[in-house]
Image: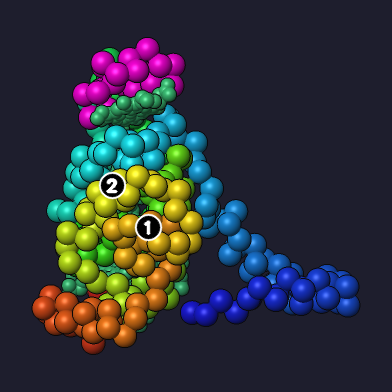
Amino acid sequence: MPNIFGPSSNVIGKTAIMGLAASPLVIMITISQFTRSAYVTKVGIPYEQPVPFSHEHHVTELGLDCRYCHTSVEKSAKAGYPATHTCMSCHSQVWSNSPLLEPVRESYDKNVPLKWITLNKVPEFVYFNHSIHVKRGVNCNNCHGPVQAMQMAYKSRPFQMTWCLDCHRHPEKYVNKPEFVFGLYEKIRKTKTGTKGEGHETIAGLTEEEQSLMVGDQYVRTGKELEEGKKLVKEYNIKVEQLSDCAVCHH
Ligand code: HEC
Ligand code: HEC
Ligand code: HEC
Ligand code: HEC
Ligand code: HEC
């Protein structure tokens, strides 16, 4: 579904308000804009979590692999959250007196799991599965933005149906070799510029596509890259004609 209220709708909205006061149309536009605003979709807004956990610190600076904490991301529908003992394997020794880590110690002592708040979710009538996407080399950042650079995690995009469908209709624009997914964070770490690279400024060792993913930009593949993508779609035996059938996501 296209976004019928584009950037210019603000101006239209204001003009309409001046001309029509509170006509039903204006009210409808206002409500529609409201439901698409960041306030409702919660895009870009960090959540208050039980502990102010930093991905930038643990992933990019310390070099922890996503799978160390999101242990089921390759195997099942859900990525999962780390158990308290995963944190305590380090924090019983490192930073063990930090007041910020008090909830972690308490959770450990009392054997009550931490209540991480889920930011990214699809409605109940939508079926999603992490493992198949990761197997097809779709990088986490494609869907979650520049996680390795986040101080506090935030949701990077609304998961609208059109967005899922764009990729399901043209997987050649996004699929990759499986090692691309976790290898990217390894590469980013090695650049030493870490997460500070801006836009498309060339960073040694990273392709344009990798640089875009690193900063959370949308990358448009070149003709040659699309050819490679098409080869992979064939190799993976992806049935593109069926991938956008309603039943794939709505059982
Ligand atoms: C591999 C070891 C390791 C694991 C596992 C780990 N951390 Fe850390 N964490 C560290 C280190 C090292 C530091 C920071 C020291 C520094 O700032 O240089 C740190 C810092 C922190 C801080 C900041 C503390 C402060 O006072 O500034 C928080 C909060 C934190 N970690 C939470 C967590 C949580 C929650 C988990 C589990 C989901 C976790 N960590 C798992 C090693 C680890
Ligand atoms: C040391 C443990 C640890 C590692 C390593 C780690 N994460 Fe996380 N991740 C967490 C914790 C704890 C949360 C929940 C708190 C938060 O949102 O920050 C989380 C939340 C997330 C979320 C938001 C989930 C939601 O609620 O919607 C995403 C996306 C995510 N991680 C992706 C990644 C990716 C990608 C990597 C590897 C580049 C990674 N994580 C590595 C511990 C970790
Ligand atoms: C194709 C898009 C896509 C990719 C690739 C992707 N995710 Fe997700 N992620 C989602 C969607 C959609 C949800 C919400 C799923 C739901 O509500 O069941 C989600 C939810 C999550 C959550 C919170 C709920 C849960 O599943 O436990 C975490 C954590 C997470 N993703 C981590 C990751 C990590 C780590 C990677 C890479 C290894 C990754 N994701 C790759 C789309 C993606
Ligand atoms: C960047 C590309 C991309 C995005 C975005 C994407 N997908 Fe997929 N999806 C794929 C690929 C590639 C496959 C694998 C097809 C295959 O191997 O047959 C797949 C497969 C699936 C499957 C089939 C799983 C199975 O067990 O057969 C489901 C369900 C699915 N996606 C749901 C979603 C939903 C829901 C969204 C949006 C929230 C989404 N996808 C977004 C690329 C994507
Ligand atoms: C690749 C996954 C995918 C496929 C294929 C898909 N949908 Fe959806 N659908 C979604 C997601 C994700 C949402 C939730 C969107 C949101 O929360 O904004 C959704 C929402 C909907 C809704 C609720 C209204 C709305 O727009 O939010 C309807 C109705 C719907 N889908 C019908 C269909 C029909 C009919 C088909 C087949 C022509 C289809 N879908 C194919 C992923 C998919």
- The residue closer to the viewer here, 158 or 175, is 175
Q: Residue at x 19, y 48 (%)?
A: 72
What residue sits right under mark 1 in the picture? Answer: 203
What residue sits right under mark 2 in the picture? Answer: 190
Q: Position of residue 224 (x, y in %)?
A: 27, 83
Q: Position of residue 164 (x, y in %)?
A: 36, 72
Q: Position of residue 186 (x, y in %)?
A: 25, 49
Q: Is residue 182 above or below residue 70?
A: below
Q: Is residue 16 above or below residue 33?
A: below
For residue 251, say whether it is visible.
no
Q: Amino acid at mark 2?
A: Lys
* Left or right placement of residue 189 versus residue 25 in this view: left
Query: Which element type, helix, strand or loop, lies under badge 1?
Result: loop
Q: Quadrant of residue 51?
A: top left
- The residue closer to the viewer here, 119 or 139, is 139
- The residue closer to the viewer here, 124 or 10, is 10
Number of labels in the image equals: 2
**Residue 89 magenta:** yes
